[in-house]
Amino acid sequence: MAKAASCSTTSKQNSDAELLAMIRRCDELWREAERLDEKPNAASNARAIELCREACVLEWKIVDAKVISPESLAAKIRAIRRAEFDAEDMAAILDRLAIDAERIAATR
C-alpha cells in the first residue's frame, strides 16, 4: 500500500510540474512575442506571429490539462485569466474547471 501511495504522490507531483512548466513556457512565449513585436522588421514580426501561435496552442493544452491539486487548479485558473479567451470559449472552459474542482474535492 505504501508503494501505491508513493506512486500516487509522484504522479501528482509530475502532473503539477508538467502543468506549471506549460504555464511558464506560455508566459515566456508571450513575453518574447511582445518583445519582438516592438522591432520594426519583417523577420521579427514573422517570429512574433509564430510565437503567438505556439502560445495559443499551449493555452488550450493548459485548459485541457488534468489538475489534481488545489495548487495546480489555482495556477491553471490564473493562466486562463491571462489568456483572454472569448466568452463562448470561457463557457466551455468554466465547465472544465468545475470538473477539475469536483475531482479535487472527491480526493479530499
Image (cartoon, grey):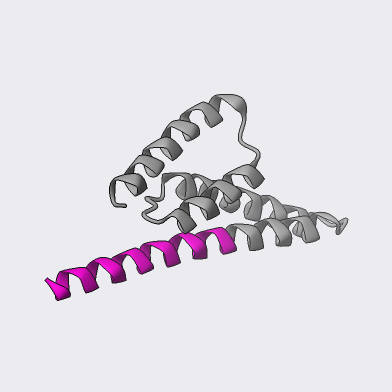
Task: Name the spot of residue 79 as percent of width and height, x first.
Answer: 59, 50
**Picture residue at 72% right of the left edge, 62% below the top:** 32
Quadrant, the N terminus: bottom left
Magenta-highlighted residues:
1-25
Q: Quadrant of residue 18?
A: bottom left
Query: In this view of the protein, which residue sits in the foreground, 66 or 58?
Result: 66
At 36% across and 54% down in the image, what residue appears? 68
Residue pictured at 86% horizontal, 59% vertical:
39
Q: Is residue 18 magenta?
A: yes
Give residue 101's quadrant in the image.
Answer: top left
Q: Is residue 54 above or below residue 93?
A: below
**Magenta stretch secondary structure, dominant:** helix
* As drawn, 31 above or below 82: below
Toward the viewer: 71 or 63?
71
Q: Where residue 72 sits: x, y (%)?
A: 47, 57
Residue 100 image offset from top left, x and y in percent: 39, 43
Outermost residue, front side: 108
Residue 14 is covered by the magenta coloring: yes
Taking depth in this image into account, of 100 and 38 the one nearest to the observer is 100
| Residue at the extreme left of the image, as rendered | 1
At 76% across and 59% down in the image, what residue appears? 43
50 relative position to 74: left or right: right
Q: Position of residue 105 (x, y in %)?
A: 35, 46
Indicate left or right for 17 with 77 as reference: left
Is residue 42 shown left or right of residue 100? right
Number of on-image labels: 0
Q: Is residue 94 above or below residue 53?
A: above
